[in-house]
Image: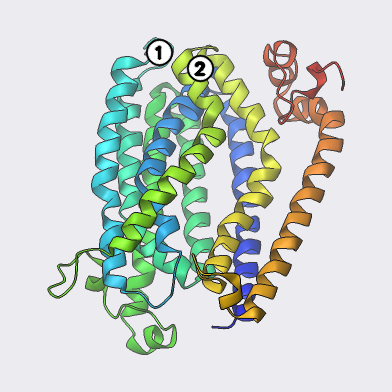
Amino acid sequence: MGSQEVLGQAARLASSGLLLQVLFRLITFALNAFILRFLSKEIVGIVNVRLTLLYSTTIFLAREAFRRACLSGSTQRDWRQTINLLWLTVPLGVFWSLFLGWVWLRLLEVPDPNVVPHYGTGVVVFGLSAVVELLGEPFWVLAQAQMFVKLKVIAESLSVILKSVLTASLVLWLPHWGLYIFSLAQLFYTTVLVLCYVAYFKKLLGFPKSAKQQMLPVSRMTDLLPSILRSRAFVNWEEAKLTWSFFKQSFLKQILTEGERYVMTFLNVLNFGDQGVYDIVNNLGSLVARLIFQPIEESFYIFFAKVLEREKDATLQKQEDVAVAATVLESLLKLALLTGLTITVFGFAYSQLALDIYGGAMLSSGSGTTSQCWPCHLHSWCCPIS
């Protein structure tokens, strides 16, 4: 596959990811605005900060490095070994889910059951949902490697929309269920997401001609399950070493991405109600990063991994591919810089108005807007220089 063709596929994947993120954010913002009128800020804080942090931390520790390693390197690989390596995310997910669940239940402050009921159930179900999502990891990595854009769009859109519909329905009809609502919705979301990938590959591999046209490295569904290889190692040890390397590199990224949630969760600097308000404001503030930068990062990581060979000098690689990669990198850096500067200029001026329109006085005149200054988010009206 030529570099220009890979670039085209990466661009399509990035644009589809951008559209998905727009859809997700619109649905999430509308759902939060709806929920705030039926449930307390404390429940929103527990779900959006405490339980979501449990879920994201489990997912990160179990799969992030595996994804990076298995999407890197040469396309001429033994996919049976790669799939075996990816299935190791499931036992890792079980371990981290149990360990972090114990921390969340025994070491962290437990909310008042009269204010936030069913907290223990929420911890268990959110941990379980992380393990369920890991069951689809081999399917996800293979789909990304083959750049199945439509599959990603359909699977993620359908799961998010159905989760939102279920959440809104339960909040409207059974608001007294508390965390049961969000726990069921989260488990339903991960289940639908995994089933979409499994159903797609089952249908695709059921027609050998279609699978051959897609140049899939597997020919039947059993090839996507872990298997013992008689003449080779169970996993590719080079990929396993690369996985450990990526884990060390991406750990800092996780701290920077979820740092404020870790601080609020482990240091109790805000009560649960203020955590809920902060999370909503934070989501608005990080809107550009989620809508534009995240899809670009995910899609063009695959582009660079396919065009350039890791740990190989640039002079020894195809100069045409190196030139294309350099041009793409320059364009992406310019896009990120211009977007960041634009949001910086207009964000300071219109952030309070945006919060007032979205959530009313609860967001625009709460404690977070008068006592804290987070320049990278939407608290700019409290800053003396704004």
Q: Earlier in the sequence, mark 2 or mark 1?
A: 2
At x 50% / y 44%, what residue is drawn?
A: 165
Between 340 and 19, the residue placed more toward the observer is 340
Indicate whether 28 appears above or below 2: above
Indicate whether 306 appears above or below 254: below
Q: In x, y percent, where is residue 29? A: 63, 37
User: Which amino acid type is marked by label 1?
Assistant: Pro
Between 127 and 377, the residue placed more toward the observer is 377
224 left or right, relative to 378: left
At x 34% / y 42%, what residue is drawn?
A: 129
Quarter holding residue 77: bottom left
| Applied colour scheme | rainbow
Farthest residue to the left: give it. 230
User: Which amino acid type is marked by label 2?
Assistant: Glu
At x 35% / y 42%, what residue is drawn?
A: 130
Task: Confirm whether residue 197 shows in the render.
Answer: yes
Q: Identify residue for label 2.
A: 42
Between 359 and 295, the residue placed more toward the observer is 295
Q: Total marks drawn?
A: 2
Q: Residues within 10 Å of mark 1 (few under 14, many from 20)?
A: some
Quadrant in the picture for the C terminus: top right
Q: Identify residue for label 1.
A: 111
